Image: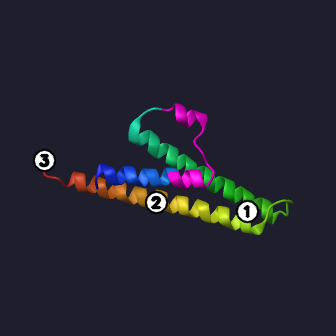
Amino acid sequence: MSIAAIESVLQQMRVTALQTGFAPTQAAAAETGGFAAELKRSLDNVSTAQTRSYAQAEDFELGKPGIALNDVMVDLQKANVAFQTGLQVRNRLVSAYQEVMNLPA
């Protein structure tokens, strides 16, 4: 797996995060450091999306006013897509790691 492919996946994760309305926080923007920091920010965004969608689903179940079922379902699907994207990134990272470890010394 090339660096360009990893960069492409990270860009897709950024776009997904922006589309779901989860912009990076000020603390995340202040962080420096390449790939590891970007991966951590992406995982934090996925976690935030899941937490918010589950909280919204719970509020809907409790009958709180102003929460529509279609909004809950859309937010749950967005969180699921973000999680699946993160899972695919992890799978590709593991695959790349295994390829590097199998290279002759």
The residue at which mark 1 appears reads as 57
Q: What residue is drawn where x is 66% and y is 65%?
A: 74
Quadrant of the rendered image containing residue 5: bottom left
Direction from residue 88 to residue 27 in the image, left or right: right
Between 100 and 79, the one nearer to me in the picture: 79
Residue 12, image x, y percentages = 46, 55
Residue 8, image x, y percentages = 39, 53
Q: Earlier in the sequence, mark 2 or mark 3?
A: 2
| Mark whose residue sits in front, 3 or 1 | 1
Q: Is residue 33 covered in magenta?
A: no
Instruction: Identify the element where label 1 is drawn.
Output: helix
Direction from residue 94 to residue 53 in the image, left or right: right
At label 2, the amino acid type is: Leu
Q: Distance between the residues labelled 2 and 3?
A: 30 Å
Q: Give the range drawn in magenta.
A: 15-31
Direction from residue 2 to residue 90 in the image, left or right: right
Q: What residue is drawn where x is 56% and y is 52%?
A: 17
Name the colouring of the figure: rainbow
At label 3, the amino acid type is: Ala
Relative to 94, residue 70 above or below: below
How many marks overall?
3
At label 1, the amino acid type is: Ala
The residue at which mark 3 appears reads as 105
Residue 41, image x, y percentages = 51, 43
Q: Which of marks 3 and 1 is nearer the N terminus?
A: 1
The residue at which mark 2 appears reads as 87
Q: Is residue 22 covered in magenta?
A: yes
Between 84 and 101, the one nearer to me in the picture: 84
Mark 3: few/some/many CA within 10 Å (<14, 14-19, 20+): few
